[in-house]
Amino acid sequence: DAQYKPFVTSDPEIRCITLDGSEDFLIIASDGLWDFVDEHTAAGLVYQKICDDT
């Protein structure tokens, strides 16, 4: 995939947060998701999946 090298960076965007134990889940994703889905929509989809599976 050398043809894509000029368009791909190996420098990740990192965000550090403190977890307090009240979290229900953690979404880890690439910009491939975040370019199209905002955090509230992603969380809603996860909550819906959790509820559907119970």
Image (tube, rainbow, N blue to C red):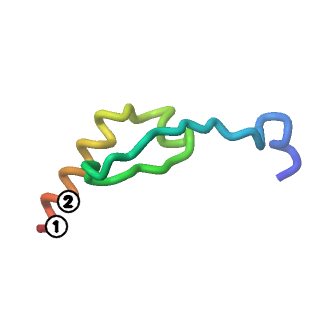
Q: Residue sitting at 77 percent across and 43 percent down?
A: 10
Residue 21: x, y in percent? Answer: 30, 52
In which quadrant of the rendered image does the C terminus lie? bottom left
Secondary structure under tag 2 reads helix
Q: Quadrant of residue 37?
A: top left
The residue that appears at 38% across and 31% down in the rendered structure is 38
Give the structural element (helix, strand or loop) at label 1: loop
Q: Amino acid at mark 2?
A: Ile
Rendered image quadrant of residue 25:
bottom left
Question: Circle 1 sits on which residue?
Answer: 53
- Camera-side residue: 9 or 1? 9
Q: Nearer the viewer, residue 51 or 13?
A: 13
Circles 2, 1 touching at the beta carbon (< 8 Å): yes
Q: Which residue is mark 2?
A: 50
Residue drawn at point x = 26 percent, y = 53 percent: 24
Left-right relation of 11 to 27 = right
Judge from the rendering whether residue 15 lies leftward or rightward of residue 49; answer left or right. right
Pinpoint residue 3: horizontal percent, then vertical percent.
86, 44
Label 2 to label 1: alpha-carbon separation: 5 Å
Amino acid type at mark 1: Asp
Whether residue 16 sits left or right of residue 24 in the image: it is right
Q: Residue at x 55, y 36 (%)?
A: 15
Residue 9, how many percent across, how many down?
Answer: 77, 38
When the figure is inspected, residue 13 is found, relative to residue 46, above or below; the finding is above
